[in-house]
Amino acid sequence: MTEVTTQLNSVEIGKVASLAAKIQEEPSVAETKWSAEVNWKGGFRSEAKIRDFSPTVSDEPPSLGGSDTGPNPVEQVLAALGNCLAVGYAAGATMAGIKLNNLSIKVDGDLDLHTFLGLKDGNAGFSNILVSVDIDSDASSEALQELHKNVTATSPVGHTLSRSVPVDIKLA
């Protein structure tokens, strides 16, 4: 017997619909836990181990004292937001029957290093993040606006960055 898979935007529609149905049926399935383990490699280099993937390298650029062997943590935060939005656009477009020809997401963040370097008190994180989404699709502008509204309203990383989240950092 041959299994028929319906895809749009390289997303298997059935898998997304099945997951949504399963969560409707059994809400506890939606409660997930994610983790990463980070090991320092000397200097400003570290590696994050996530599931069974090759480690994700992190470093700082030479201008910040690093050896530039990988993106720095704040760049990874911006990438995480862009990647999360890309998943949202792909899933949302697929479920709405919208074919995406191309999707490009540019994420920029403003960060003042004064607090990080101990030069003054204040916010060590981003003061502003600007995201620009470029969608190439034959869908109507109304359909794309609705897709955009839904994606921005449901992005896990977007929600994490845009609200206060308790972070408990303990020394073992």
Image (cartoon, rainbow, N blue to C red):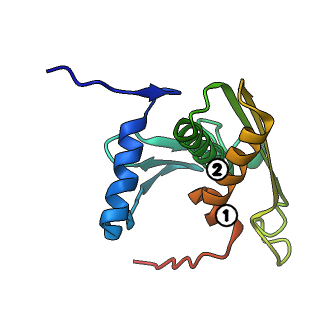
Q: Measured along the vertical axis of the image, is residue 129 above or below residue 124?
A: above
The residue identified by callout 1 is 161
Q: In which quadrant will I find the C terminus?
A: bottom left
Q: Nearer the viewer, residue 79 or 85?
A: 85
User: Residue 81 placed where, x, y %?
Assistant: 64, 50
- The percent position of residue 8, horizontal first and vertical second, equals 50, 27
Q: Quadrant of residue 25?
A: bottom left
User: For the N terminus, which image quadrant?
Assistant: top left
The residue that mark 2 highlights is 81
Q: Is residue 13 above or below residue 26?
A: above
Residue 19 against residue 164 in the figure, above or below: above
Contact? badges 1 and 2 (CB < 8 Å)? yes
> What is the x, y in percent for residue 87?
55, 42
Amino acid type, callout 1:
Leu
**Label 1: which secondary element:** helix
Query: What distance separates the C-alpha of mark 1 from that of mark 2?
Result: 8 Å
Q: In the image, what residue occupies the spot 60% across and 58% down?
A: 154
Task: Please rate how many residues cluster around mark 2, counting C-alpha atoms within 10 Å: few if below 14, some from 14 to 19, many from 20.
Answer: many
Q: Quadrant of residue 5?
A: top left
Query: Few, some or many C-alpha atoms within 10 Å of disc 1 (few <14, some 14-19, many ≥20)?
Result: some
Q: Amino acid at mark 2?
A: Leu
